Amino acid sequence: MSFVVIARYVTNPGERAKVLDLLAPMAAASLAEPGCRRYDLYAGTDDDVVAIVEEYDTEADFAAHCDSEHFKRIVLGQVVQLLTERVVTRCVPVAGAGA
């Protein structure tokens, strides 16, 4: 079983490119973490939307990710200030649903 996180960020007008630039090294650092299987960035078809799909071996691996230096420095220290909305949804596979 894995633990999946889907984050939807709505950036301040005109800040999407900057957020994506900040998140590129975040993705690389996150993929080097123990238990991180996936860290994919998406630009929404709406100009101000960024989506992140992350997958970890366990919820504890995600908690460690949130406590990492790069998460605190990049996401909390730089990205959050460029957002008007941040929704983070934690997910687990549904039995029998092809997961």
Image (cartoon, rainbow, N blue to C red):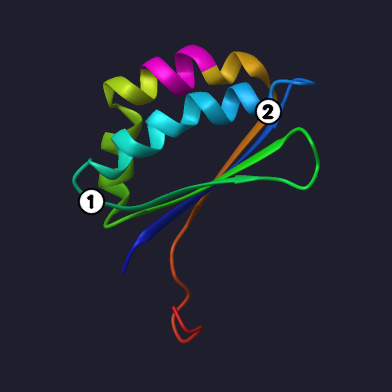
Q: Label 2 is placed on what type of residue? A: Arg
| Disc 2 to disc 1: CB gap under 8 Å | no
- Percent x, y for residue 57? 27, 57
- Percent x, y for residue 67? 30, 27
Other residues around mark 2 within 10 Å, as few (<14) / some (14–19) / many (≥20): many
Quadrant holding the N terminus: bottom left
Q: Residue at x 48, y 30 (%)?
A: 23
Q: What is the quadrant of residue 38 in the picture?
A: bottom left
Q: Residue at x 64, y 27 (%)?
A: 17
Which residue is nearer to you in this view: 41 or 86? 41
Task: Tell me: 72 left or right of 41.
Answer: left
Magenta stretch: dominant secondary structure: helix
Specify the segment rendered in magenta: 73-78
Label whose residue precedes the other's in the sequence (2 or 1): 2
Mark 1: secondary structure: loop
Mark 2: secondary structure: helix
Other residues around mark 1 within 10 Å, as few (<14) / some (14–19) / many (≥20): many
Q: Label 1 is placed on what type of residue? A: Gly
- Give the residue pinned by disc 2: 16
Which residue is nearer to you in this view: 75 or 17? 17
Disc number for residue 7: none
- Give the residue pinned by disc 1: 35
- Percent x, y for residue 62? 33, 43
Q: What is the quadrant of residue 47 in the picture?
A: top right
Q: Nearer the viewer, mark 2 or mark 1?
A: 2
